[in-house]
Amino acid sequence: MKKFSIYLVFLFALLVSLTSATFGSDIVISPLQQQNFRPSNLPPIRSGVAGVTNGSANVVLSTPVQSTWAGIGGFVVELAGVSYTVANTTSTTQLTLTTTYAGITGSVSYRIFPFVLLRIYALSTFQPKGASYIVQQGSPGSASWYKQVGVSVISDGSNSTAYIPQMTLDATTDAVNPATQNSRYFAGFYRQEGGLISAYLCFEQFRLPATTTPTSWSAICTFNQTTTQPNDPTTYYTARQLDDRWRACSQGQSYYFSSTGVRLSCLTYGSGLSLDLNTGTLSATAAATLDTRTFVYGAAYGMVCDGVTNDQAALNSAQGAANAAGKRLILPAGLPARHP
């Protein structure tokens, strides 16, 4: 019996150790109320009747919400005058709360305040320490975000406040692969249809440490201010500045400078040119139109101008034709005409 008890204690200690290793990289960031947050073109407050049960976290809405809300949590819903945080939009007519509803069972009035999306993007792919999953890289503004929460924007008539819910992110500084331990995130506020409102935090890119874990957004700013991240805007470019300089062109286009400076524009080839996308070879697909009203072309009289062929007779014929017609003579491109 004594050996069995020792075995149970050992097993419990092992489970605790494995659990702490698995979730050792998780960083829980406290909720935040950001004052004077006033994005334009927010949707109106959504209201109606909801079915609720005392002690349950499920809320059934009388009017469906947009299907694009599926899976989104973090925003605020007011039930019978009491505010709750939504953990997940289970379906277009059902919400799951982060806490259980504490009120009278039945039908109550509800209000869903307008919300924006706070999206976190991983700027490089990395595997957090103790995790079996991979945090995939995503370009800011794309659908490949790492985390996304709804941030309710509530106005009291004189002030507009953004209610940023609690979030859990992985540390970037203790990635399994040492080469990716400098991984960074990008945080930005987006409208529900996807348009960027503004970047969040003091830096466009930020890291999260595994030790001395920052548990607030302000602490994350403090940590990133003390790292070796460059702060002189004359010696580095942010990801957004690079994207602005290197335009996003379509397949088969090239770059050109439309004006003096370092900003590139997209070049589209006309009907007489084609680009081989495999080799990058630019070819003429249509012969140039010859202006025979103004010029006499030496090639039409047999001139080659390859430095080998004797072009004297052809040159005499072409020059004579040009003189007789009062036109200019155009020689073929290449080496000077060879004479005997």
Image (spheres, grey):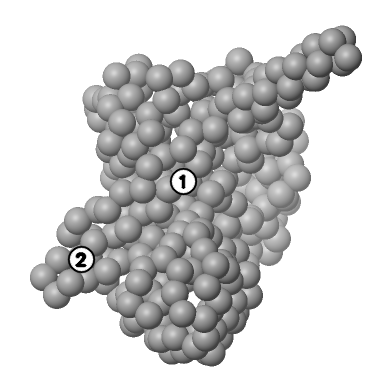
Q: Is residue 314 visible?
A: no
Outermost residue toward the left in this view: 158
Q: Residue 259's spot in the image, x, y percent?
A: 31, 50
Q: x and y percent of residue 25 in the render? A: 56, 27
* Residue 212 in the image: above or below residue 265: above
User: For this rendering, which residue is in front, 312 or 266?
Assistant: 266
Identify residue type, mark 1: Met
Q: Amino acid at mark 2?
A: Ser
Is 21 situated above or below 71? Answer: above
Question: Which residue position holds label 1?
Answer: 167
Direction from residue 204 to residue 156 in the image, left or right: left
- The N terminus lies in quadrant: top right
In the structure shown, which secondary structural element does the residue marked by tag 2 occupy? strand
Label 1 secondary element: strand
Q: In the image shown, does 339 or 99 lie closer to the viewer? A: 99
Q: Are marks 2 and 1 in contact (CB under 8 Å)?
A: no
- Badge 2 is on which residue? 160
Dot 2 alpha-carbon crowd within 10 angstroms: few under 14, some 14 to 19, many 20 or more:
some
- The residue shown at (27%, 69%) is 154
